[in-house]
Structures are given as structure tokens and as C-alpha cells.
Image (tube, rainbow, N blue to C red):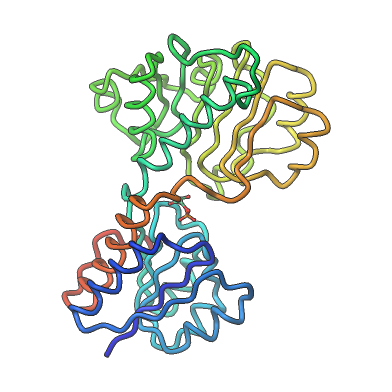
Amino acid sequence: MAKILVATEKPFAPAAVEGIKNIAQKANYEVALLEKYESKDQLLEAVADADALIIRSDKVTKEVIEAGKNLKIVVRAGAGYDNVDLEAASANDVVVMNTPGQNSNAVAELALGMMVLLARGGYNGKAGSELRGKTIGIHAYGNVGRYVAEIAKGFGMEVAAHDPFVNKADIEKDGVKVYDTVEELYSNCQYVSLHIPANDKTKKSIGYDLLKSMPKNGVLVNTARKEVIDEDGMVKIMEERDDLKYISDIAPDNADVFPQKFEGRFFFTPKKMGAQTAEANINAGIAAVEQIINFIEKGDRTFQVNK
Ligand code: 3PG
């Protein structure tokens, strides 16, 4: 019986685990669960006899891939796969997939939720501000970006986007204004919501110059990855401009600086919370187990990311 290991340092909702187990059982697969593990060694041990691996932001390094002697497929139940060593996977004939779109609405709702939280001063009893009529620029118009656009329109915001990889007309048909350059997006939008992946081209790409160009009371909303921010550049411009704010789903590396210097101008989730809804966990978890079964039984490689 083939074995699927679900290794989630940040566990799925119980309903998602149950769903994964039910589907696996019907297809005659065994499921092993490794949740809230504290050391890499626990993962190395658990993966040793697994045929397939389902993860979230868990780090799948060369060591993990090589420890999985029977490993054929890793599915990142979610969008970003910057936590998986794709080269090592390919070198060991391990297919890597993600489950695009499955947790996107949850991330988008958090982005808007954090915007309201900050606009209302963390519900401190003082007069805050509203989102209606404000501009929001969506930096990368993928699955999450589309949901952010839809929800932001519901709030009555003016929505714009920049994404060189998406056809301009496809963005415009959603009633979203397109800026051809990233500089135009930042300089025209009070809010900017980040949805770029973390890779060699994007790491530290958002820093001093882009933030400096933002309109008065600019707010950067980051539900993507902390690695895309140039943290030194961000601190420098936030020191120079006391109207700028930063909201992020997971604290930056220099989080200690913020309460000292930027009181009331930031909000960070204590743990990455974007995809932490039962719905997103169920969608992504079920998609992951189905993709594994379809790959092992039928060779279906849809959503493979290490081609
Ligand atoms: C993703 O890339 O899908 C999100 O960042 C969610 O990550 P998580 O599964 O670790 O919450």
C-alpha cells in the first residue's frame, strides 16, 4: 500500500485532515500524519518510507528529498513553492506540484481584513479612516490578486494592477486599471497589495525607491513573502516619511525595530495566517491528495512545477 505523509509544522484544520484520509483510504493509500514537528530530524525520519508528501510552508530541502528513498511526489498544498528544493527534487526524479488557487480567497480576505484593522487604528477607540474611494494597486494579478480586486471593489476602492505576465485586456475586463510599470503602480496607489512570488528576481525588490514614490498615507500590504522586501530600505523610508505604514502576514526579520520606531504604523501576524481557514485547508489538502493519486495512478502531471 502506497504511503502519503502529511507533514505540516502548521497543521491543517481537522476537517481537511479527515478529508485527505477519506480520499486516500478509498483509493487504497495509507496516510501518516506529522504535525507541529519541532526538528528537521522528525521530518527526515517520517519521510523515509513515504511514497508521497503533502506539505505547506514546510522546508523540503535536498536532505529531505534524499531521505525519502521511495518518494515520487511532493505536493505543496498552497501556492508558493519557494520552500522546496526543486533542483534536488528533479535530480532525484521527484515530481513537485502546488495547488494553485485553492487557498487564494483566504489570503485575499486577510489582506483586506488587515487593511481595515490598520485603518481603524487597531480598534483603539479613536477616529480612523475608511477604504471607500481609496486607491489600491495589486502587484501581480494572479489567483490572490484577482480575489483582492473583487473584494476591494466591494469596499468601493479604485482598483489598479501591474503584472507583466498577464494579458492587459484580461485584467481590464475585471474593471481594473492596468499600469505598465511597477513604478507607476506604486506612485499612483495609496494601498499596494503584494502578490509576487519569492524568487531570485523578486527577493529584496520592494524597498526605498518604490515606497518613497507612494502617495501620502501609503500602506504596503504584504501577504506574499517577507523575503521580497528590502527591509533596510523600508526602515529608511519609514523613518523619513512618518505617514507610511506596513502590514504583513508574518513578521519581518527586523520586527523588533517596528515597535521602537513606528508605533501605530504596522501590523504583523504572529504566524503566517493567510491560508489559515478551514475552507482553504480543505480545498488545498483535498486537491493535494487528489493530485497525488492522479499522478501515481495515471501519470497526471498537471500542476507540476519542476519541469
Ligand atoms: C501559499 O503560498 O500558499 C501561502 O503562503 C500559504 O502558506 P501556508 O500553507 O504555509 O499557510
Taking the view exactly as shown, the residue that stands out farthest to the right is: 260
Judge left or right: residue 264 versus residue 53: right
From the top left corner, tell me how far across and down residue 65 is, in percent: 49, 78
From the top left corner, tell me how far across and down residue 226 is, in percent: 61, 44
Q: Residue at x 61, y 33 (%)?
A: 206
Judge left or right: residue 251 versus residue 19: right
Taking the view exactly as shown, the residue that stands out farthest to the front is: 125
Q: Quarter holding the N terminus?
A: bottom left
Judge left or right: residue 296 versus residue 214: left
Instruction: From the viewer's side, name the closer residue of 136 and 259.
Output: 259
Q: Quarter holding the C terminus?
A: bottom left
286, above or below 218, in the image: below
* Badge count: 0
Q: Residue at x 74, y 42 (%)?
A: 255
> Is residue 217 among the parts visible in the rendering?
yes
From the top left corner, tell me how far across and down residue 172 is, in percent: 28, 20
Q: Residue at x 63, y 75 (%)?
A: 39
